[in-house]
Image: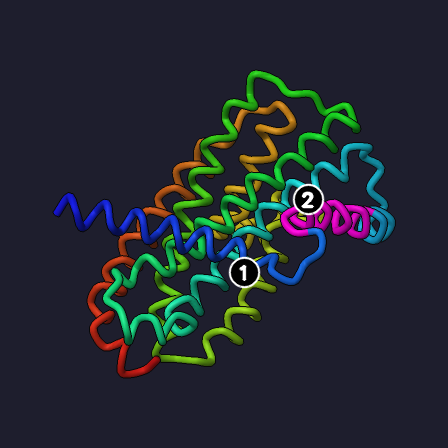
């Protein structure tokens, strides 16, 4: 058992390393692009939506970048997990590997890149005089919850994706809906005080992003958001792991 566990850890590390290399294989900037891309997105979104909504808040770029980074990780990691089993189909047919390592590695290597990209956020925050406070220590809560939530979602998607190939296209549509209900490029104060508040509050990713922003801007996080998003993440992970383990023996017939 101990040997099997250590072997799984070794394979997982290699899959994560391979994922990072493949992601930037044909990029001249390499992992530096993970710093430049969100920064460029922030500039565009700030100009477009800052003008469109008439936002006068001087910290609006920091607000946008915080949401953009978390959503970007969730989007990329779940899409990677969704196709992970099918992409590695040839290896699965030749060598026995614990199949759950494939979607896990897809989430983990994107999480690693995401953590590096946070350097940009804190640099931008300092430029706009958003200085760290004691509340910044709260940041580990939404970051951990985000990882758990992404793992659970990724496991479910990777299972469905083996049997239902069109899931990859449907998930892109779902992600667009998720993006608009995460308040990434608009401030939701008016929406939260209306009858449509449930649209945001029912989205665990919005709750995670909201608490992350609270940590960055020096505010107490919303405990209800924390409990709800964490519960959603744990439940999704448990359901995803169960689905995956119950169906993985049939994967070879579909990949």
- Residue that carries the numbered disc 2 in the rendered image: 35
> Which corner quadrant of the image does residue 102 belong to?
bottom left
Residue at 33% in and 69% down: 159
Image position of 131 (left or right of 158): right
Could you tell me what secondary structure mostly forms the magenta stretch? helix
- Work out how far the residue at label 2 is from the one at label 1, CA to CA, in angstroms: 17 Å
- Residue that carries the numbered disc 1 in the rendered image: 22
Give percent across and percent down for residue 25: 60, 60
Residue at 41% in and 66% down: 84
Circles 2, 1 touching at the beta carbon (< 8 Å)? no
Give percent across and percent down for residue 169: 53, 76
> Which corner quadrant of the image does residue 152 belong to?
bottom left
Above or below, 22 relative to 92:
above
Above or below, 195 relative to 208:
below
Image position of 154 (left or right of 234): right
Image position of 202 (left or right of 184): left
* Residue range of the region highlighted in magenta in the rendering: 30-46
Q: Nearer the viewer, mark 2 or mark 1?
A: 1
Callout 2 crowding tier (Cα within 10 Å): few <14, some 14–19, many ≥20: some
Q: Residue furthest bottom?
A: 253
Q: Decide which of 194, 143 is in the foreground and name it.
A: 143
Give percent across and percent down for residue 212: 56, 35
């Amino acid at each position: 058992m101990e040997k099997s566990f250590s072997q799984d850890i070794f394979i997982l590390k290699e899959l994560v390393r391979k994922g990072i290399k493949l992601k930037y294989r044909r990029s001249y900037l390499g992992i530096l692009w993970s710093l430049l891309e969100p920064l460029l997105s922030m500039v565009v979104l700030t100009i477009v939506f800052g003008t469109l909504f008439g936002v006068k808040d001087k910290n609006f770029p920091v607000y946008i970048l915080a949401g953009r980074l978390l959503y970007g990780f969730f989007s990329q990691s779940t899409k990677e997990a969704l196709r992970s089993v099918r992409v590695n189909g040839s290896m699965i047919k030749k060598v026995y590997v614990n199949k759950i390592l494939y979607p896990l590695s897809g989430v983990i290597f994107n999480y690693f890149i995401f953590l590096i990209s946070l350097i940009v956020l804190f640099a931008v925050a300092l430029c706009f005089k958003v200085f760290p406070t004691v509340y910044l220590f709260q940041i580990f809560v939404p970051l951990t919850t985000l990882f758990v939530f992404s793992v659970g979602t990724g496991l479910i998607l990777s299972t469905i994706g083996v049997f239902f190939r069109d899931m990859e296209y449907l998930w892109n549509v779902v992600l667009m809906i998720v993006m608009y209900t995460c308040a990434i490029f608009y401030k939701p104060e008016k929406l939260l005080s209306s009858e449509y508040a449930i649209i945001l509050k029912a989205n665990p990713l919005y709750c995670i992003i909201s608490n992350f922003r609270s940590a960055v801007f020096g505010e107490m996080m919303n405990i209800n958001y924390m409990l709800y998003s964490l519960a959603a993440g744990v439940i999704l992970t448990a359901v995803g792991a169960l689905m995956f383990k119950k169906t993985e023996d049939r994967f070879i017939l579909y990949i």
